[in-house]
């Protein structure tokens, strides 16, 4: 009574290999580019915003707080539609906004970057505030200026705390780009939808997208390991040997160091 | 699209055969009851759950500011349910996931302006209930005037995901297709109204959609017009799980009784869609 279940391996394989002319490869490259552009923009915006958020001047702090309240308080999907569709209606769609309102790729990447900046602000702020105030005082006592203290003492130490979650954000971002399928950016999910809209092979088309997402996240994870080996780890303190996972999981981790 | 017409005739013949047993109340205004499908067929006892992409006026949309569905399909679905002595429950879903939703029993039937195509018929049985074509919507001062499907070559087109329109436009771009060397740029959206919005914003040249929807759009927005006439006229059907005769037969009988007592005609007339009468074959 129901159509027999099967996996259309011929379709799956013919799209997967060779990948050179597959729309999925083009989509994967686009996802990677959007990830790097949007996330890096988010990181770059996050630094000044984090400094503003920790500022003692209310006139600096309040706008930053408002930004975080707005961008963390609304769904990313809503923000994407706001930049692509809402903005044009609000403004009457003047010509100078065409690069955003008529270009889904730009509007989408902008939405991802501005949303991410709010999250990066918190990650960077947490990193900066984790540095012992004694470090500050010591550097001042040695005669360093405020600027020198930040650049030479605080930020290098804070980076060790900031880098690992930042790379998690890169990996998250690569998957969040799939939200841009709603505004027809030809990323991986949109590409899968274009296949199953025509041939109804949902499982196969989604599997193809999944294969490419896994390739992207694996690549980013490999890069993350290399960078963390450089910045993330505290080499000055010897780490105790890692206990097996099951011992940590059931609380047999022994005394904290 | 036209390839599916012989199958429609076959279905119609089956429909007549299915109705052989019950006396038809032709002409009489009284609503003849049709025995409903057994409860094992229904998601909820006493309720016909109908899957629909409720963002497709005038066939289905929510009454502004409410969650009450309205439209030609909605009136028809409600009438079919009440013929069977059931309540209709409308379940909103995206169009590109509507067939897997039927297979996975998220609802009992599909009524969602669904064109009967060969590929869909591999997983779905249809009760044809309406005929619709496709139209090109452009902005009033547009320099683009597509009149046939090949005219889309080189144009930027917005469609809804999972529709026959997306299927056809994609086919043009395939190797050997009419636009293989001068590709159609296709932007596909989850809902058809979002595709229309791209035309209004000037992101795309053409909104390619079903003719009743196109007619409704240009009526509501004076900045839009049709380019060319109606193409690819084909039947739309009520979708039922493949081979599920316990559901198919009562739906066919209920639809037949609506045709016979004039309810079908009055619903068509109410929505200005009499041109889409399924009995007018061409």
Image (tube, rainbow, N blue to C red):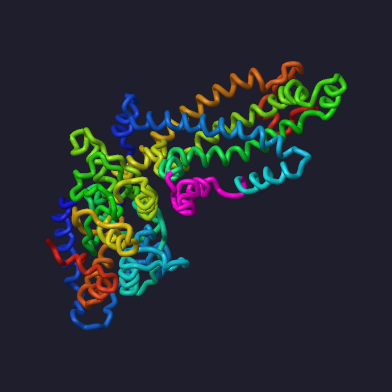
Find out whether residue A77 is within the magenta segment. yes
Residue appearing at x 21%, y 38% in the figure = B179
Relative depth, front residue between A163 and A142: A142
Q: In this view, does B180 lie to the left or right of A84?
A: left
Q: How far across and down, in percent of the image, does residue B268 sit?
A: 25, 71
Q: Residue at x 19, y 73 (%)?
A: B21
Q: In this view, does B149 lie above or below B85?
A: above
Q: Is residue A199 visible?
A: no
Location of residue A109 in the rendering, given as x and y in whole percent from the top left corner: 49, 38
Toward which corner of the image does residue A234 lie, by quadrant?
top right
Horizontal relation, residue A12 to residue B182: left or right: right
Q: Main secondary structure of the magenta part?
A: helix
Most distant residue in the front direction: A95
Q: What stretch is highlighted in magenta?
A: A72-95
Q: Name the one closer to the observer, B196 or A253.
A: B196
**Is B160 located above or below residue B109 in the figure?**
above
- Give how far across and how far down residue A119 sits, in percent: 63, 39
Residue lying farthest to the right in this orientation: A141
Left/right placement of residue A107 relative to residue A136 reads: left
Q: Is residue A108 toward the left or the right of residue B176 in the image?
A: right
Image quadrant assignment for residue B23: bottom left
B188 in the magenta segment: no
Q: Position of residue B266 (x, y in %)?
A: 25, 75
- Return the residue nearer the eye: A139 or B125: A139
One can see residue A12 in this view = yes
């Amino acid at each position: 009574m129901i159509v027999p279940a099967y996996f259309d391996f011929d379709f799956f394989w013919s799209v997967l290999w060779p990948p050179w002319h597959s729309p999925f490869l083009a989509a994967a490259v686009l996802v990677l580019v959007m990830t790097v552009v949007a996330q890096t923009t988010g990181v770059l915006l996050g630094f000044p915003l984090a400094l503003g958020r920790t500022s003692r001047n209310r006139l600096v702090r309040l706008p930053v707080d408002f930004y975080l309240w707005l961008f963390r308080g609304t769904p990313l999907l809503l923000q994407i539609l706001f930049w692509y569709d809402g903005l044009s209606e609000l403004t009457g769609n003047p010509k100078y906004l065409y690069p955003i309102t008529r270009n889904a790729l730009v509007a989408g990447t902008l939405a991802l970057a501005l949303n991410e900046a709010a999250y990066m602000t918190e990650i960077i702020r947490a990193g900066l505030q984790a540095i012992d105030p004694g470090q500050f005082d010591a550097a001042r006592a040695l005669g360093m200026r405020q600027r020198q203290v930040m650049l030479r003492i605080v930020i290098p130490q804070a980076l060790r705390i900031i880098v690992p979650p930042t790379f998690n954000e890169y990996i998250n971002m690569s998957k969040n780009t799939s939200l841009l399928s709603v505004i027809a950016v030809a990323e991986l999910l949109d590409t899968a939808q274009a296949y199953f809209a025509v041939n109804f092979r949902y499982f196969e088309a989604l599997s193809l997208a999944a294969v490419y997402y896994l390739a992207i996240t694996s690549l980013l994870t490999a890069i993350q390991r290399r960078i963390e080996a450089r910045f993330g780890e505290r080499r000055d303190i010897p780490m105790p040997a890692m206990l097996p996972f099951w011992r940590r999981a059931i609380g047999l981790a022994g005394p904290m160091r | 699209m036209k390839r599916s017409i012989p199958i429609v005739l076959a279905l119609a013949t089956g429909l007549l055969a299915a109705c052989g047993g019950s006396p038809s109340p032709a002409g009489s205004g009284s609503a003849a009851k049709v025995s409903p499908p057994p409860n094992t067929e229904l998601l909820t006892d006493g309720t016909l759950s109908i899957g629909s992409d409720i963002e497709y006026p005038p066939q289905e949309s929510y009454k502004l500011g409410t969650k009450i569905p309205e439209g030609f399909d909605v009136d028809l679905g409600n009438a079919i349910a009440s013929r069977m002595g059931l309540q209709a429950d409308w379940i909103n879903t995206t169009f590109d996931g509507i067939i897997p939703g039927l297979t996975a029993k998220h609802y009992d039937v599909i009524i969602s302006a669904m064109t009967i195509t060969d590929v869909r018929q591999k997983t779905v049985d249809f009760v044809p209930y309406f005929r619709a074509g496709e139209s090109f919507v452009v902005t009033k001062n547009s320099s683009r005037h597509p009149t046939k499907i090949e005219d889309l070559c080189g144009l930027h087109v917005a469609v809804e995901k999972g529709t026959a329109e997306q299927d056809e436009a994609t086919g043009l771009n395939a190797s050997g297709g009419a636009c293989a060397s001068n590709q159609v740029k296709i932007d596909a959206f989850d809902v058809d109204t979002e595709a229309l919005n791209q035309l209004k914003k000037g992101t795309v040249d053409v909104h390619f959609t079903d003719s009743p929807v196109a007619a409704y759009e240009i009526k509501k927005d004076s900045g839009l017009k049709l380019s060319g006439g109606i193409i690819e006229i084909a039947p739309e059907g009520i979708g039922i799980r493949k081979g599920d005769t316990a559901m198919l037969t009562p739906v066919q009988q209920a639809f037949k009784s609506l045709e016979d007592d004039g309810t079908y005609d009055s619903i068509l007339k109410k929505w200005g869609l009499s041109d889409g009468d399924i009995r007018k074959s061409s």
